[in-house]
Amino acid sequence: MARLERIHYQPMRFDRITSDDLPWVADDTRPSISDLPQIYFSDGEPWVEVNSYALDRVEMGKSIKTVVSDMGHLRAYADWLEDEDLDWRYFPKKKARRCVFRFRGHLVGQREEGDLSPSTASARMNAVERFYRWAKKEDLLEQGRLWDDHTVTVSMTTEVGLRRSFPVEKSELSIPNRKRHGDGLEGGLLPVSEESSRTLLEFLRGEGMVELYLMFLIGFTTGARSETIRTLRTSTLDIARPDPSDPNLMRVPVGPPTPVKTKQGVSGEILFPLGLIRQLEKYRTSIRRLERESKAAVEDKSLLFLTRVGREYTDNSFTDQMSKLKKRLRAAGHKHYDRLKFHQSRASFGTWTVSRMLDQGHNPKTILEFVRMAMLHKDTKTTWEYITFVQHSPMKEDLSTRFFDFFSGQDSQFDAGSVFND
């Protein structure tokens, strides 16, 4: 995985007269730069061109904060390039195969899955585009046109009320920062019904898709994000502790300083049903998982979930698994899952929990705090979306009542049964 580091940059100049042994000396005519962001690939090699780009932007007057933000997006791009084993200069004749167009498709997929907000997807693509425009200007690329631009007219009203129009160049790579019509919850996705969730879990179980079965089960019963679930470690189960108020719930620490990743590095504890913890403990020692662990690199062996060839579930490999799942569902006649997104398991957990708490008579403030902590929301505004959604929804059915057994670990889904072929 690529990493972003901050360095103290001291400009140097060549001066053999001053010193024969060390001809490079500090250049006092140029200011040093504190916390200059730099990107390094997983093998330790710096991304020289991007790092030069960051330096150039700071020296041209851009704030460190702005440059750090852009470099954060470019680090994500570096991760993707490594996952895809692509060079950043890969621009074959066919557009669809070019690295920037493939990355655009990847971002759109993350946005659709709810792993990226529309604004982040848009900003990330814009940051990549700006770097390539700079690289082209600096003659670091030999290719002709990297993509096509077109001109759009933008109108604005001045402070004195005059309306002005002016042309703006826009790239075909741009990802519009807009939500789909009818969006109501984080990630722009709607929850699935309790019946649909059970049908999905039974299908995964019957098809022997054990890892996806367990991942969806975690999503539906804890509200954890895909990235959090994919980075759970076997040691995570060992540090789970009972909730003081309910022995059927276990508190699992995630985020820094644990190795389990969360959005924006938020630290907290996720509530796991005791039955789920027990099922995951059985999976940890199953022959199926141990065979995968035997193929894994040393740093990945402790991951709870590994691919068939013993690798970490990356964004790309997990997206592939979801695509295969939807094809199987379609072939089995479950066509209503065509637009299934993993993030819907999180949306379902949130709405089910809010619905049950409303039915129990809890006031919105209590619900807000509980759900915010359970779902690790950084902003309470996101949590309020769930409360508002449930209050305005006509389809509460009996989900909240039936969800209690599901959430508390008393449900039959937590009986491993024939899931593990040991």
Image: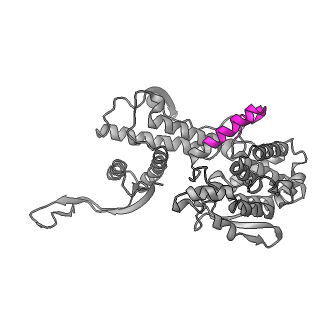
Q: Nearer the viewer, residue 255 or 232?
A: 232
Query: Residue most toward the bottom?
Result: 244
Against 346, is 161 above or below? above
Q: Relative to residue 79, is residue 162 depicted above or below?
A: above
- Judged left or right of residue 403, residue 346 is left
Residue 318 seen from this side: yes
Q: Is residue 329 magenta?
A: yes
Front residue of 3 and 332: 332
Residue 248 as seen in the image, left or right of residue 216: right
Residue 240 as seen in the image, left or right of residue 351: left
The vertical placement of 105 against 414, above or below, is above
How many numbered circles are shown?
A: 0
Closer-to-camera residue (405/60):
405
Observer able to see residue 158: no
Pick out the residue farthest to the left.
Answer: 17
Question: What is the chief secondary structure element of the magenta stretch?
Answer: helix
Residue located 71% across and 39% down the image: 340
Residue 16 is situated, as x and y percent measured from the top left of the image, at: 11, 62
x and y percentages locating residue 18 in the rendered image = 11, 66
Give the percent coordinates (x, y) of residue 122: 53, 41
Relative to residue 100, is residue 256 drawn left or right? right
Residue 108 place in picture, x, y as percent: 57, 38
Magenta residues, start to end:
320-340
Location of residue 325 (image quadrant): top right
The answer to if 317 sits in the magenta stretch is no
> What is the quadrant of residue 90 in the picture?
top left
The quadrant where residue 415 appears: bottom right
